[in-house]
């Protein structure tokens, strides 16, 4: 048996035990019916079908012979615990049930002959099973569907006769009709077969249990373990997993009660491992993972000290590794079936521990298997059968149970053979596979540090396996994490291994990178080690072969030297570019612009700082900075002249200053550092370009800068007073803005806020030059500042012509209005008029730009300067206008009667903080007409202060032809106005107010009265009533005057009139007032018999209701006048 495979668990142990049922009498190759039956048994078995393992065997198949049963164990000495073939025998060789399939219908004409043939075939099966308790059954394949039980008397008789002929129970005879419902019949057959198999395994369990009474604990300890294992295994085949677990646990306890010594230690551990696997598997199957973990820990605690032979200690490590690996696989399989694992308890820990024991195995093998001897002959590991009889025994002394080995010389040769076999095992492959499984688990359960730790071990194993490419790939991946988390000691150890790999591969670029990091500030190497590495790096730069790294395999070193010599050939690669941003190299670099922004008339200053951390000075030949604006790169280069190089001293910071003048076309652009490049080496050797992205820095710079800033805050700013630059306090300024030259002009704005809606609002702009030379091409951009609400742009209009009202086509922003040249000290003024159609705040921009000649660093340039001023102006409503319709008695009107005069009242209330001049007002009538000769404005040249109001009254009427009974538009009210403070010749603003709509009505009768403005007590008061018929019909009118306490009257108290269409009647009454003051006139009651729906109040509303009556005056005689 091979040394590597002997620790693998047997497949019959790892599979799920299922009842074994043999099917005979089926020709699955040539008979289509038999093939269909076999496919129904085996193909696409669902999980809900009974667990049975089927095999098709010939009728004369030879089953394993049953040994003669023992009647006594008195002189029996067992040779081992469990035979290696026992589980396979009961899984695949000895069936629980043999089923004979035979084609026979109940009405077959050759019934007798076929009955005899069937009985003969069954007898052959029984003969081959002689001594076994295996059950047998017969299945008759029939073409017809059978009738229900009891209805087919022929079938019943012949079934009974067949059972008698075959010596078969009625429960063991089945019928299988080959119809469309074949699968359904097969499933019913399976269930019956399963019951027979259960009975068989139950019988076997009882048979094994019956042996217990013959055993004694002195000589039969091995049998106690064997029998408990068999009972447990039969219980599993019976699918009684609870009892199986109980018996496995009993067997496990018994195996540890065996007397252990060096010769049987391996057998005890092997059996303990097999039984432990079964227990853990069943615990996971029962969803009790904590029991499985507890059992495994107990198993490890009990077995980890049972090492056995010291010369074969590597075997114990291999066995321990396999235990952890198997449990990890069981754990992982349970998780896939639904078990939930956690970060601190997952299969990764078991794979990791398995890898640790494999590493221990490798170390022990290197210690114990170094003897350079040949494999012994004959082979002591060879057996006649090709395998072991019992699990865990030695091939050269199988069946031996005594404490001392039977042949010491054979024992020695056997141990030597095992050691030689172990020497050929590829331990690194085993370790890497286990570590890989562990890494996958820790990655799944988000354990990044455990994953990184194991990847380092994998890299080291690849290194030992001389697969340097994979080793470097893994180590390089892990180093990123250790740099980020600042594990400098761990990083140094990994870099050391990586450097060896790079040397042995002769990978020049990788070798240079790892040398640079091991020389850097993150390395924890001693100074002499750093000096050796720096010396090797210098050799590589000079195109020489570096010295070998310590602790390298000598055979690999000689191969590496050959590779290095090939790399040194003239045709070899001479230039390398290394992006050092993600490493921690021995050269540190930081760059900064001296200011976040520079005016275009100032030189831009850039500083690049370099510092080295290696033991000896470093020279470089070129330093170049790259900027986002490429044309400035030529000014950011330091290059050695001739053979001289620029030298950097260890621990000292060196500053390189660059200055250049910006182009005027780049005003407003951002200039960024895109990279810095330092060239090490010469053209005669190798050139290595160290490249930093942006403004420098490396993987550790960010944290160091943070620490430095905290330290400076804690201890004050004293660090800045030191003559030597504090490297960690140097901040990087990676970009700067080129901004326009500072303008030397003043821009002043004068205006009177707020602006009034629709007015021409004047903003007076004054520009004065303070430049020393002429400001040329002065241009003004004025108007609404961009970026505001889009609606404001449509309701704001800007113009320079304030003599007239600008229309809606005027823009919101006037761009680049030329103002000419401006001499030093000269001043110019402009008036910008703004018309705001809507109210609300607006931001206005006044941008004055100009060109001027200036000198920077001896260069004549033309600078474009500009000065911006912004102002926020609120726009408000100048006045509020209200309009209403009233009757000639000043009563509010809901409806207006056609061809009857009424009044329009308008009120203008000023809401402007500035005085307003109302120039004039007018009406634009649509459907109404004036009731007076001429409409004249009553508001001409009226000045309104804040809060004051002005009112107008117009007498109007609707002409008779106007269509009534609907709402009509009336017209517009026009107001011309301006600010009182504006110039007299300035434009007037015209505000248009739409008058409210009215509802028209027509009245059949219009009554109005002529009466004096007042009366006197006891003096006659004549009142004349005019009654007009406004219809096309003759109207009958009934009138009556109601008596009143305040008046006596003369005239018709009650009268009935008839008025022709369009004509008028007059009624005259003399009222005689009796009381002074405001008195209610006698009420006039009017009714229209032809228009009964007409309301009397509607007819009477045009009449006066009250009149003022003066008291009666005394008449003055001549004497009283004279006395006065």
Image: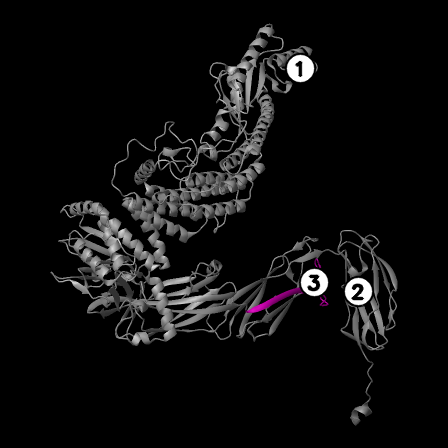
Q: Nearer the viewer, mark 2 or mark 3?
A: 3
Residue 419, image x and y in percent? 31, 40
Q: Residue 436: horizontal and vertical position, in percent?
A: 38, 44
State left or right for residue 160 relative to residue 915: right
Density class for disc 1 (Cα within 10 Å; few <14, some 14-19, many ≥20) is few
Q: Nearer the viewer, mark 2 or mark 1?
A: 1
Q: Which residues are magenta?
A: 878-903
Horizontally, is 696 left or right of 1108 in the view? left
Q: Are the residues flagged by discs 2 and 1 in contact, CB closer than 8 Å?
A: no
* Residue 1097 lies in the magenta-colored region: no
Q: Secondary structure at mark 3?
A: loop
Counting residues from the start of the chain, the first of labels 2 and 3 encountered is 3
Label 2: how many residues lie within 10 Å, few (<14), some (14-19) or many (20+)? some
Q: Which mark is residue 515?
A: none
Mark identifier at residue 147: 1
Residue sitting at the far front: 75
The residue to which callout 2 is attached is 1025
Q: Camera-side residue: 283 or 331?
A: 283
Asked whether the residues under the numbered discs 3 and 1 touch, taking CB atoms below 8 Å apart as contact, a structural biologist would say: no
Question: In this view of the protein, which residue sits in the foreground, 459 or 805?
Answer: 459
Q: Residue at x 38, y 48 (%)?
A: 356
Residue 668 in view: yes
Q: Earlier in the sequence, mark 2 or mark 1?
A: 1
759 in relation to 71, above or below: below
Residue 896 place in picture, x, y as percent = 70, 59
In this figure, which residue is indicated by the disc labeled 3? 901
What is the secondary structure assignment of the residue under circle 1? loop
């Amino acid at each position: 048996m091979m040394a590597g495979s002997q620790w693998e668990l047997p497949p019959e142990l790892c599979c799920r035990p299922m009842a074994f049922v043999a099917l005979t009498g089926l020709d699955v190759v040539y008979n289509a019916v038999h093939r269909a039956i076999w496919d129904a048994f085996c193909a696409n078995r669902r999980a809900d079908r009974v667990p049975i393992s089927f095999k098709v065997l010939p009728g004369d198949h030879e089953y394993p012979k049953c040994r003669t049963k023992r009647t006594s164990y008195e002189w029996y000495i067992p040779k081992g615990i469990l035979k290696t073939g026992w589980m396979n025998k009961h899984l695949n060789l000895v069936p629980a049930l043999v089923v004979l399939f035979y084609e026979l219908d109940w009405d077959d004409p050759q019934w007798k002959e076929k009955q005899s043939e069937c009985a003969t075939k069954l007898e052959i099966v029984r003969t081959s099973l002689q001594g076994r308790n295996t059950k047998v059954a017969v299945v008759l394949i029939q073409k017809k569907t059978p009738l229900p039980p009891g209805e087919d008397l022929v079938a019943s008789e012949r079934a009974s006769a067949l059972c008698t002929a075959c010596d078969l129970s009625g429960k063991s005879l089945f019928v299988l009709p080959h119809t469309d419902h074949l699968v359904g019949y097969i499933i019913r057959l399976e269930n019956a077969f399963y019951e027979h198999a259960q009975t068989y395994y139950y019988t076997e369990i009882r048979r094994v249990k019956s042996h217990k009474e013959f055993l004694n604990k002195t000589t039969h300890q091995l049998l106690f373990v064997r029998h408990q294992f068999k009972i447990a295994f039969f219980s599993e085949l019976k699918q009684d997993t609870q009892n199986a677990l109980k018996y496995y646990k009993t067997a496990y306890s018994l195996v540890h009660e065996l007397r252990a010594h060096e010769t049987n230690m391996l057998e005890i551990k092997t059996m303990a491992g097999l039984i432990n696997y079964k227990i853990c598997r069943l615990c996971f199957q029962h969803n009790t993972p904590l029991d499985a973990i507890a059992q495994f820990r107990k198993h490890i605690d009990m077995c980890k000290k049972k090492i056995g032979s010291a010369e074969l200690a590597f075997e114990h490590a291999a066995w321990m590794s396999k235990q952890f690996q198997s449990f990890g696989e069981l754990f992982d399989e349970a998780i896939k079936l639904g078990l939930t694992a956690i970060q601190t308890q997952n299969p990764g820990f078991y794979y990791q521990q398995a890898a640790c024991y494999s590493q221990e195995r490798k170390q022990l093998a290197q210690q114990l298997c170094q003897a350079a001897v040949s494999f012994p002959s004959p082979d002591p590991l060879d057996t006649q059968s090709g395998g072991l009889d019992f699990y865990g025994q030695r091939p050269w002394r199988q069946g031996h149970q005594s404490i001392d080995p039977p042949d010491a010389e054979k024992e020695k040769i056997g141990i030597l053979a095992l050691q030689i076999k172990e020497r050929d095992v590829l331990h690194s492959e085993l370790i890497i596979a286990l570590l890989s499984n562990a890494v996958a688990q820790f990655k799944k359960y988000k354990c990044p540090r455990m994953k990184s730790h194991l990847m380092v071990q994998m890299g080291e194993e690849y290194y030992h396996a001389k697969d340097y490419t994979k080793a470097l790939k893994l180590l390089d991946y892990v180093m990123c994490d250790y740099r980020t988390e600042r594990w400098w000691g761990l990083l140094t150890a990994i870099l050391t291994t990586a450097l060896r790999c790079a040397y042995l591969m002769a990978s020049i670029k990788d070798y240079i990178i790892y040398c640079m990091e091991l020389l850097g500030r993150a390395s924890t190497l001693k100074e002499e080690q750093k000096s050796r590495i720096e010396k090797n790096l210098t050799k590589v730069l000079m195109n020489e072969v570096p010295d070998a790294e310590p602790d390298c395999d000598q055979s690999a070193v000689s191969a590496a030297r050959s590779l290095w010599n090939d790399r040194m050939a003239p045709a070899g690669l001479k230039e390398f570019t290394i992006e050092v941003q993600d490493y921690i190299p021995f050269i540190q670099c930081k760059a900064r612009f001296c200011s976040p922004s520079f005016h275009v008339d100032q030189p831009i200053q850039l500083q690049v700082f370099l510092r080295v951390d290696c033991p000896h000075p470093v020279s470089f030949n070129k330093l170049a900075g790259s900027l986002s604006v490429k044309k400035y790169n030529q000014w950011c280069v330091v290059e050695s002249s001739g053979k001289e190089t620029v030298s950097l001293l260890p621990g000292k910071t060196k500053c390189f200053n660059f200055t250049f003048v910006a182009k005027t076309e780049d005003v407003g652009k951002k200039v960024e550092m895109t990279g810095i490049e330092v060239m090490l080496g010469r053209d005669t050797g190798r050139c290595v370009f160290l490249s930093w992205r942006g403004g420098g820095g490396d993987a550790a710079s960010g944290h160091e800068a943070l620490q430095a800033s905290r330290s400076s805050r804690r201890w004050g700013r004293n660090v800045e007073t030191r003559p030597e630059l504090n490297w960690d306090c140097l901040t990087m300024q990676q970009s700067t803005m080129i901004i326009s030259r500072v303008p030397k002009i003043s821009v002043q704005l004068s205006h009177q806020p707020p602006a009034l809606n629709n007015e021409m609002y004047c903003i007076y702009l004054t520009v004065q030059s303070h430049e020393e030379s002429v400001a040329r091409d002065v241009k003004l951009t004025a108007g609404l500042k961009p970026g505001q609400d889009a609606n404001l742009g449509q309701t704001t209009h800007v113009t320079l012509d304030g003599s007239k009202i600008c229309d809606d086509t005027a823009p919101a922003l006037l761009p680049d209005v030329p103002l000419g040249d401006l001499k030093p000290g000269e001043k110019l003024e402009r008036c910008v008029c703004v018309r705001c159609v809507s109210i609300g705040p607006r931001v206005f921009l006044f941008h004055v730009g100009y060109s001027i000649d200036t000198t920077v660093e001896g260069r004549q340039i033309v600078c474009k300067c500009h000065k911006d001023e912004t102002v926020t102006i609120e726009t408000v409503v100048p006045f509020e206008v209200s309009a209403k319709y009233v009757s000639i008695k000043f009563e509010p009107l809901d409806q207006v009667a056609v061809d009857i005069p009424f009044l329009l009242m308008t009120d203008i209330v000023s809401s402007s903080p500035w005085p307003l001049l109302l120039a004039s007002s007018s009406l634009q009538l649509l459907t109404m007409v004036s009731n007076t000769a001429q409409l004249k404005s009553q508001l001409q040249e009226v000045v309104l202060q804040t809060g004051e109001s002005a009112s107008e009254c117009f007498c109007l009427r609707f002409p008779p032809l106007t269509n009534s009974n609907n709402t009509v538009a009336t017209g517009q009210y026009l107001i011309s106005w301006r600010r009182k403070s504006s110039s007299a010749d300035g434009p007037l603003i015209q505000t248009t107010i739409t008058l409210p709509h009215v509802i028209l009505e027509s009245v059949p009768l219009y009554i109005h009265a002529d009466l004096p403005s007042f009366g006197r007590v006891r003096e006659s008061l004549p009142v004349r009533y005019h009654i007009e018929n406004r219809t096309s019909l003759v109207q009958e009118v009934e009138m009556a005057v109601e008596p009143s306490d305040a008046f006596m009257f003369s005239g018709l108290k009650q009268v009935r009139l008839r008025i022709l269409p369009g004509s008028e009647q007059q009624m005259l009454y003399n009222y005689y007032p009796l009381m002074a003051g405001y008195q209610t006139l006698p009420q006039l009651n009017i009714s229209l018999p032809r228009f009964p729906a007409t309301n009397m109040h509607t007819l009477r509303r045009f009449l006066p209701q009250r009149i003022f009556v003066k008291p009666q005056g005394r008449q003055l005689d001549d004497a009283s006048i004279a006395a006065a």
